Image (cartoon, grey):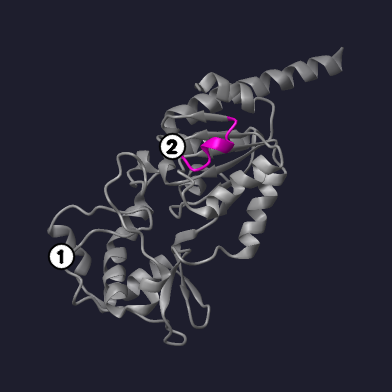
Amino acid sequence: MDAAELVALLRGRRVAVLTGAGMSTDSGIPDYRGPDSPPSNPMTIGQFTCDPAFRQRYWARNHLGWRHMDATQPNAGHRALAQLEQAGVVRGLITQNVDLLHTKAGSRAVVNLHGSYAQVICLNCGHRMSRAALAELLEQANPGFARRAQRLGGIAVAPDADAVVDDTASFRVVDCMRCGGMLKPDIVYFGENVPKDRVAQAFSMVNDADALLVAGSSLTVYSGYRFVRRAATAGIPVAIVNRGPTRGDELATIKVDSGCSETLTLLADELICARKSALTAGNRAQIT
């Protein structure tokens, strides 16, 4: 299928969008499962909570990685979806990413399905704090760590704000300032469940739409795939834009094997133009 068929399917429809890591590759954040992705083992909640050495290693790497993710900017695909929302085409966006790039691009009706890198939560008392505030505490506990690690070479950042750095054995982890409990990025890790209210909000977006557009997701993880299943069961057309096969291909009305940035930019240009033409024609009809 080509982009012209994608435009034809979505023209005149209220669109809900589901995005995955492939949306952010053009911003410099690697995909876990894309055809060109390096081998990667995303962290599980069991590893984080049960292994102090693993948790120490994670926080040392995250102390570097979150800064790079915080500085990352949206790409053309993110901007195209924000423009489609502003034009009234996209009615809601569900993202499996934790990078906040959709919000940075200007999208407002966003469900961050797996949370975001920018918040931290205490697993004991539930206290939340910003990642920036925790960074100050970690820097006080580990003076000069970030500078030393950066001098050793480039830092590769993963989709969960992890970074590749080897010297982590001396890193001091900071606990909750209120109760001394374990702090964790407010991200849904493998083995955790997405909060029920967040899932309900996302399902509502799909139910209220005339079409579901999936962009940059292999749909391997059920937390995203379920929305494709819901749309297909309800008879809502599903369009998928992704490099390589996805778990939802058999349920898709249209599959475009292409990158997100170029395809979504074209889609936004065509759909916004079509919507403006329809509004103009409607205004003329009212006048006559």
Q: Which residue is mark 2?
A: 245
Quadrant the C terminus occupies: top right
Label 1 Cα neighbours within 10 Å, binned few <14 / some 14-19 / many ≥20: few
Residue at 70% across / 35% down in the picture?
210
Outermost left residue: 152
The answer to whether residue 197 of the structure is visible from this angle is yes
In the figure, 57 relative to 70: above or below? below
Helix or strand or loop: what does disc 2 sit on?
loop
Residue at mark 1: 148
Question: In which quadrant of the rendered view does residue 23 lie?
Answer: top left
The x, y position of residue 165, in whole percent, is: 20, 62
Disc 2 vs disc 1: which is toward the camera?
2
Q: Amino acid at mark 2?
A: Pro
Q: Main secondary structure of the magenta part?
A: loop
Residue 167 lies in the magenta-colored region: no
Q: What residue sits 40% from the left and 73% below the top?
A: 46
Residue 242, placed above or below residue 158 = above
- The part of the chain drawn in magenta is 245-253
Identified at 42% across, 70% down, the residue is 45
Counting residues from the start of the chain, the first of labels 2 and 1 encountered is 1
Q: Amino acid at mark 1?
A: Arg
Find numbered disc 1 in the image and state the secondary structure of the residue it sits on.
Answer: helix
Q: Disc 2 to disc 1, how far (Cα)? A: 41 Å
Q: Can you see residue 82?
A: no
- Name the spot of residue 185 as percent of width and height, x first: 42, 68
Percent across and percent down for residue 226 are 59, 50
Residue farthest to the front, as pictured: 250
Residue 110 image position (x, y, % from top left): 58, 50
- Which numbered tag is attached to residue 48? none
The answer to whether residue 176 is left or right of residue 68 is right
Looking at the image, the residue that sits furthest to the top is 288
Image check: 247 left or right of 70?
A: right
